[in-house]
Amino acid sequence: MTLWEMTAVLLAGVAAGAINTIVGSGTLITFPVLLAVGLPPVTANVSNSLGLVPGSLAGAIGYRAELAGQRHRLLRFGTASLTGGLTGAVLLITLPGSAFEAVVPVLILTALVLVVLQPRVARAMAARRAAGTSAPATDGGWLLLACIGLTGVYGGYFGAAQGVLLLALMGMLLPDDLQTINGIKNVLAVIVNGVAAVFFLFTATIDWTAALLIAAGATLGGVLGARIGRRLPPIALRALIVVVGLAAVTKLLFF
């Protein structure tokens, strides 16, 4: 990579770390940049997963106050995320690279739809809570546990917008406020990305320059996201994610 390409990857890591801490879908920033600098899709995905782990960890630490008293849930949900994340990582390495290249545009477009729809989901959740009807179970029951496991599979395989999925699922099935749910989401993202990264260390080709640049940027972004990320205009943030995601789909399909 040239100096300018390295700078672009580093800055993409900062943006992804902040976005992942706030809402999720940071991969829609880093993955297209890695494709643009010439990495093959599977190598880009593996390197990205490894690089985002420190940023996810920094974001989770930033939400430690909201995580007080959540030990039981984190153990329960974390087990499902661990199993799902490992399963998704195994699928990524086991299935042919052509399968990944074929399915990723669909996954990115699905993730973009989720990013766009998330405000509506949040409003619907708030209205449901205000009405006081159908109060969710304390731990979300087996339905939420299964959904978290499936989200982990998706996260281990690709991961774009897994945070959005987790926020929507837990927001609908848990009685807690959004900040507590966001803290739990950040821990689950650490688990999924972490177990996938460990698996990839022994089974996949990693571009270490890209992974280390993303790790450095995502760590800074995770800290910034936990501290000041809530001040970012949500509309501008979502618009950026959608534009970058569409650029990634265009790159995969036509170039």
Image: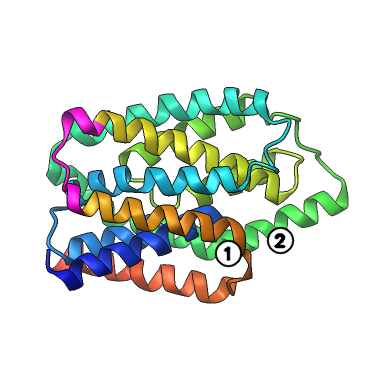
Q: Closer to the camera, 55 or 157? A: 55
The colour scheme used to paint the residues is: rainbow
The residue positioned 26% from the left and 69% from the top of the image is 8
Hey, what amino acid is under mark 1? Answer: Gly
Residue 170 position in % (x across, y down): 63, 41
Q: Closer to the camera, 212 or 42? A: 212
Q: Closer to the camera, 240 or 246? A: 240
Q: Is residue 107 visible?
A: no
> Split into 4 quadrants, where in the image is the C terminus?
bottom left
Is 104 situated left or right of 181 in this image? left
Task: Give the quadrant of residue 166.
Answer: top right
> Split into 4 quadrants, where in the image is the N terminus?
bottom left
Reading the image, the residue beneath label 2 is 123
Is 52 situated left or right of 19 in this image? left
Residue 54 position in % (x across, y down): 40, 45
Viewer-side label of 1, 2: 1
Hey, what amino acid is under mark 2? Answer: Arg
213 relative to 132, above or below: below
Q: Secondary structure at mark 2?
A: helix
The residue positioned 40% from the left and 55% from the top of the image is 218
Reading the image, the residue beneath label 1 is 229
Q: Closer to the camera, 154 or 60? A: 60
Q: Secondary structure at mark 1?
A: helix
Is 140 situated left or right of 109 in this image? right
Q: Which residues fall within the magenta stretch?
A: 200-209
Residue 152 position in % (x across, y down): 43, 35
